[in-house]
Image (cartoon, rainbow, N blue to C red):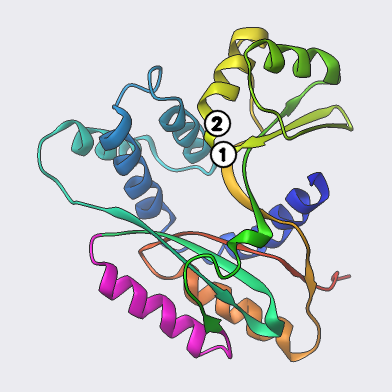
Amino acid sequence: MGRAFQNRKESMAKTAAAKTKVYSKYGREIYVCAKSGGTDPNGNLTLRGLIEKAKKDQVPTHVIDKALDKASGSGGEDFSPARYEGFGPGNCMVIVECLTDNPNRTFGDVRGCFTKNKSKIGTQGTVSHMFDHCAIFAFAGEDEEAVLEALMEADVDVTDIESEEGRITVFAPHTEYAKAKQALIDAFGELDFEADEIQFLPQTTTPLEGDDVAQFEKFIDMLNELDDVQNVYHNAELPETA
């Protein structure tokens, strides 16, 4: 599982640069998270992790503060989550997560990205059953047993723990995110999380080659350029570049 996580991190790093509207995407996600779970990061661990992640991605403080201010007021935009699934170039599997105030517009935009790149959008559940929906935490450390013991004492359902090159990575069901994070903080104090997120990890990968590689990169770039798209997950395995 760790290798799949690393592969996705590396492949997504290539597409992250295409997120020209990264500030607005973070602002939207922070707004929705704070609106539903409260604007205090100490009481809303999902929000806390999101703010820390935004800062690591060099999102300015004023963008974060503006989203929190909007969430603490009455009214505001009514964003709702939407998820689309399908098959991309080379028959790889793709999941697209969105936050939208107009589901019809968003579906049309996402479907357009699929159809323009020899890809096929499917119905809910088309490919998600081939992914694990995981909470992932990675931080510096080597005592795998101490981490497992702390999580078990807190009654956290741990899927997997890996220790490699001075870094521990914890995998848990996405429903255990807040519980697992609180258990880690309680046991080890403030941790500098290298990874602190919920994502879809593919159970298998689909190697791409030839024209499919360029088509896939174009497809991902088009999706990331959409304002409503927050995350794109896939199981494509791209050729290593020299």
Query: Circle 1 sits in a helix, a strand or a loop, which is it?
Result: helix
Q: Quadrant of residue 87?
A: bottom right
Residue 41 in sight: yes
Please rate how many residues cluster around mark 1, counting C-alpha atoms within 10 Å: few if below 14, some from 14 to 19, many from 20: some
Residue under numbered circle 1: 174
100 drawn magenta? no
Kindly indicate whether the residue at mark 1 contacts the one at mark 2 (C-beta within 8 angstroms).
Answer: yes
Secondary element at image label 2: helix
Q: Amino acid at mark 2?
A: Tyr
**Residue 177 badge:** 2
Q: At which x and y percent is residue 192?
A: 64, 24
Residue 65 seen by the camera: no
Residue 25 in the image: x percent, y percent? 39, 54
Check the picture and name the quadrant holding the C terminus.
Answer: bottom right
Residue 154, quarter of picture? top right
- Magenta stretch in the rendered image: 101-119
Q: Main secondary structure of the magenta part?
A: helix
Q: Residue at x 47, y 67 (%)?
A: 124
Q: Is residue 172 left or right of residue 48?
A: right
Using the numbered discs, state the Cα–Cα distance from disc 2 to disc 1 in whole angstroms.
5 Å
User: Badge 2, how many Cα within 10 Å: few under 14, some, many 20+?
Assistant: many
* Residue 38 image position (x, y, % from top left): 29, 27
Against 138, residue 88 (above or below) is: below
Is 203 or 182 nearer to us in this picture?
A: 203
Looking at the image, residue 220 sits to the left or right of residue 136; the answer is left
Q: Identity of the amino acid at label 1?
A: His
Name the side, left or right, on which 115 lies relative to 155: left
Q: Residue at x 40, y 17 (%)?
A: 42
Report the residue that reaches farthest toward the left: 74
Classify 51 as above or below 206: above
Q: Position of residue 158 (x, y in %)?
A: 70, 29
Q: Tell me the residue at 76%/13% (across/down).
A: 149
